[in-house]
Image (cartoon, grey):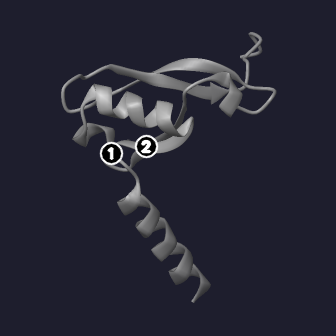
């Protein structure tokens, strides 16, 4: 039963997540700026968290420019994603 509830929560979250491919570049960028940090869908079963500035990242993270597909731009700059610095340890 718990698995069913978790699955339903995942489906509900996916359905309610704004999808960048259904909005203009300007609208997607404005959504990130308005919320500061928001999870957006970027295609079928794809999503990420986008932020307007490093202020919305963990203290150890840095920002990386984020480009996503929108209805009017295949590579729309909408803000940033947060990630841990690499320091060349790959």
Picture coordinates of residue 77, whole percent (x, y): 39, 19
User: Which residue is most to the right?
Assistant: 60
Report whether 59 appears left or right of 64.
right
Q: Is residue 77 above or below residue 81?
A: above
Image check: 58 left or right of 48?
right
In the image, what residue occupies the spot 18% across and 26% down? 72
User: Do residues under tags 1 and 2 come within 8 Å of each other at their CB atoms?
Assistant: yes
> Furthest residue to the front?
34
The image quadrant of residue 55 is top right
Residue 83: quarter of image:
top right
Q: Image point 41% across, 53% down: which residue? A: 17
Mark 2 residue crowding within 10 angstroms, few (<14) / some (14–19) / many (20+)? many
Question: Which SS class for mark 2?
Answer: strand
- Residue that label 2 marks: 40
Q: Is residue 87 left or right of residue 32?
A: right
Quadrant of the frame with the N terminus: bottom right
* Position of residue 23 in the picture relative to residue 58 (left or right): left
- Rounded to the nearest angstrom, the CA distance separating label 1 from label 2 is 6 Å
Quadrant of the snapshot with the C terminus:
top right
**Residue 48: assigned label:** none
Question: Residue 87: where, in percent of width, then height?
Answer: 77, 12
Which residue is found at the position 23% from the left and 22% from the top?
73
Tag 1, which secondary structure? Answer: loop
Q: Which residue is mark 1?
A: 19
Q: Along the line of sight, which residue is nearer the eye, 90 or 77? A: 77
- Nearest the camera: 81 or 25? 25
Furthest residue in direction top, as rendered: 88
Q: Nearer the viewer, residue 32 or 44?
A: 32
> Which of pointers 1 and 2 lies earlier in the amino acid sequence?
1
- Tell me what residue is drawn at x 56 percent, y 74 percent: 6
Q: Position of residue 18 (x, y in %)?
A: 37, 48
State the image quarter where residue 26 is shown. top left
């Amino acid at each position: 039963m718990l698995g069913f509830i978790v699955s339903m929560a995942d489906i509900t979250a996916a359905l309610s997540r704004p999808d960048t491919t259904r909005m203009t570049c300007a609208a997607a960028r404005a959504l990130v700026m308005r919320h500061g940090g928001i999870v957006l869908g970027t295609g079928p079963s794809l999503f990420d968290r986008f932020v307007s500035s490093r202020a919305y990242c963990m203290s150890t993270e840095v920002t990386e420019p984020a480009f996503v597909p929108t209805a009017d731009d295949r590579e729309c700059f909408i803000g940033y994603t947060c990630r841990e610095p690499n320091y060349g340890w790959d």
